[in-house]
Every structure is written in C-alpha cells, then in structure tokens.
Image: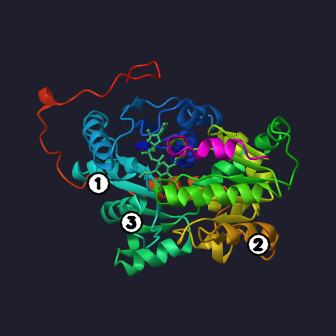
Amino acid sequence: MRVLSVVGARPNFMKVAPIHRELQRREDMHSRIVHTGQHYDEKMSDVFFRQLAMPEPDVYLGVGSGSHAEQTARIMCAFENVLLQETPDILIVVGDVNSTLACSLVGVKLGIPVAHVEAGLRSFDRSMPEEINRLVTDCISDVLLVSEQSGIDNLHREGVSPEKIYFVGNTMIDSLVSCIEAARELSTLKDYDLHPGSYVLVTMHRPSNVDDIGKLGTIVESLKRVAANLPVVFPVHPRTAKRLHSTGLYATLASTPRMILTEPLGYLEFLHLMDQAAVVLTDSGGIQEETTYLGVPCLTIRENTERPATTSIGTNRLVPLDARRIVDLVSKADELRQQSAIPPLWDGHASSRIVDILESRRWEKTAEHPSLDQENAQQPSANPWGHSR
Ligand code: UD1
C-alpha cells in the first residue's frame, strides 16, 4: 500500500513523524511525504525534520506565505500535479492548517481516499480559520482518526457515518513520548539561566490575539506584570514578531526585566522548557495537549478550545485576555496540577493504531481521475531540500 502524507506548517511535523516511522516498519507499506512549504524557515520547519528524525520530504512544493486564498490555491494547484504523478492508495492529512484543507480537497476530487488525523475537534468558533479547515476536511475525508472523545461526539452530532470514525489517540503525544528523554538531556534551562519550576513559558500567535493592536498591547502588559514575579521565556512566532515590531511593542517587552525573548525554538528545546515550566501561557492548540500529558499547568488565552479534554481531564484552563486575571491565575496555576490525568489513548501508540486501520481495509479509489491537460500543468517549485522527486 502506497501512503502519501502531507505536512505544511510547524504543528504538522510532530504528528506525521511517528506515522511515517510506523509505516516504514511494516513490510507491505510504502510511505512518502509531501511538504507544502506553508512554513519554510529553518526555525519553523527544517529543525523539526532533523530533531524528529524525519527524512527530507520526497516532494517540496515551496508555496510560502500569502493570504488564505492565495496560500490555499497555490497548495492546491501544486499538489494536484503531485497526486497525479504519485497516485497513492491513500492520502494522510493532519490537523487543521491551510495545507490540510487544500490537500484533502485535491485528494478527494481525484478520487483518492483521504484519512484525516485529529478529526472531529471543534471550537465552534467560525472566526478561526482552523475551524473552517477542520469542518471542511472532516466533511470530505473517508477515514476520520480521532484523538479525544469530543471528536467522536462532534462527528456523531454532525451525522457522520460511524464506520468512518476511529478513536486512535494522539500522534502528537507519540512524538512527545519518543523525544522527551532526549529533550531532558539538553542544556536549554542552563542556556537561559532558568531553574526548574520557576519560570513562565509563553507562546502567542493566533490572529485573534496578535493582529489587533489593542489586544496585543494587553498581552504585552500582562507579560510585563507576570515577569515582575517570575522569569518569562517567550519564543516569538514570526506573525507575532512582525506585529510587535510594527507597533513598537517589541522594544517594550525587550526592555522588561526577567523577560527572555527568543526566536522560535526547536522541538526538543521547546519540549524541555515546557516540561520544567511553572506554567505555560499560550494560545496554541497543540501546547494545550502537550502540557496536559506532561502535567504542567497551562493557561490558554482564548475564549474556547477545540481540545476540551485538556480542560476537563488535563491541566489546561481558558483565560480571558485581562492582565489582572492572567497575573492572578499564573500565581494560582499550581492548583491545575491536582487531580489532572492523561486522556484515554494518549499513550504513545496512536500511530501504530492508525497504521493497523490503514492496513486492515482495502481502499478503493472513490472516483475516476478527471482528465488533466498535462501540457498546461505547472511544475512544482524548485526543491530547496536538494534532491529531485
Ligand atoms: C499557521 C496555522 C495555525 C498554526 C500555526 C503554527 C493556518 C490557517 N494556520 O498559522 O493553525 O497554529 O501555523 O505556527 O494554517 N512566517 C514566517 N516563516 C515561516 C512561516 C510563516 O516568517 O516559516 C510568517 C508568514 O510570512 C506570515 C506569518 O508568519 O506572515 C503567518 O504564517 P502562516 O502560515 O500564514 O500562519 P500562522 O500564523 O503561522
């Protein structure tokens, strides 16, 4: 069976790496990886391939940044050519980024069965681009691989046929489990002069938090107040860095005592900092899950979460964007460690369950390939990974 997996943005790499590894272990499976290039920096992409021991992608589309429409359209055009050449038996897409939506649409229209990893998650907030990506991808995928109970409930409520739905657990946790020991051996804390359990780790990149100058200002004010009590480490996402610089707020943060601003960190360095933090302050999706697994308190500056197991079972709590509340909750965050648990099937074996499912069924093409004018088809961008397809 030939399986083609898509990665595009930073949170995809740790979800696909363990699936690819598991596919390679099985004799009858053949695994290839396409990288759309939605994220393209060394620090947003390449370092993850190295640290997760993933091979270079077999195909690199190099689409880069753009508006949602531009980025999605560029991925679709380039990926269609790839799929017509690769003709896999099944296509794997993960998560909720623009690459997930774009590639699942192309796959389905070419009649290739699509498996969606992390299916069924819902924030019920359609102003989030990721929510639209999740809804559309789930609606058109053939296999829905679910990471937590809410995903099953949501898909049932939406009337999805039960035989498409599989509760497999969380592949991001597979990567965490296999990397945490290596992460703990690093010198990351020493490098930043930090002590275990006595610093706050921050990530912030959601458009809803960082694109609006008023909200960004409140975040900066909150972090300044938090840093009055504990060192704050803040690896700054490129979207946030641009906004902080253009609004002059970067200088305010940089001049705050005990505030450590860094570029985006590698997977292992970030895991190490997360594992030893007193509390993590974030608006990310995946970090809510990773902190829950590690038992580290997490305050999520959002009005909703598509990962409710992290608040009902784990160490996560939603926090309004209000400086006083944030400082107060950071000081009480230790309470979140009590009575928290790891959600079912977050055990490091989700990828092996996924590959079992893929192996156990005969996947039929769902439509005829529509004819494509090959002469007019664009060729994918040059491959900076240095080898041809
Ligand atoms: C994307 C995902 C989001 C995910 C996040 C993790 C969508 C809709 N959003 O958001 O779900 O949580 O990735 O990082 O797919 N940039 C760089 N270098 C890079 C990548 C991006 O400088 O390697 C810049 C871009 O030029 C752009 C900004 O960062 O201005 C945002 O990048 P983009 O991929 O559009 O969205 P994210 O905010 O990263």
Disc nearer the start of the sequence (3/2): 3
Return the residue at label 1: 364
Return the residue at label 2: 336
Tag in front: 1 or 3: 3
- For badge 2, the amino acid type reads Leu
Magenta highlight on residue 247: yes
The answer to whether mark 2 and mark 1 are in CB contact below 8 A is no
- Label 2 beta carbon less than 8 Å to ligand 1: no
Estimate the x, y position of residue 108 in percent, counting from the top left. Answer: 27, 53
Nearest the viewer among 3 and 389 is 389
Magenta highlight on residue 292: no
The crowding category of the residue bearing disc 3, from other C-alpha atoms within 10 Å (few below 14, some 14 to 19, many at least 20), is few
Range covered by the magenta-colored residues: 243-257
Return the residue at label 3: 127
Judged from the image, the secondary structure of the residue bearing numbered disc 3 is: loop
Left/right of residue 362 with respect to residue 247 in the rendered view? left
- Residues under labels 1 and 3: Cα distance? 36 Å
The crowding category of the residue bearing disc 1, from other C-alpha atoms within 10 Å (few below 14, some 14 to 19, many at least 20), is few
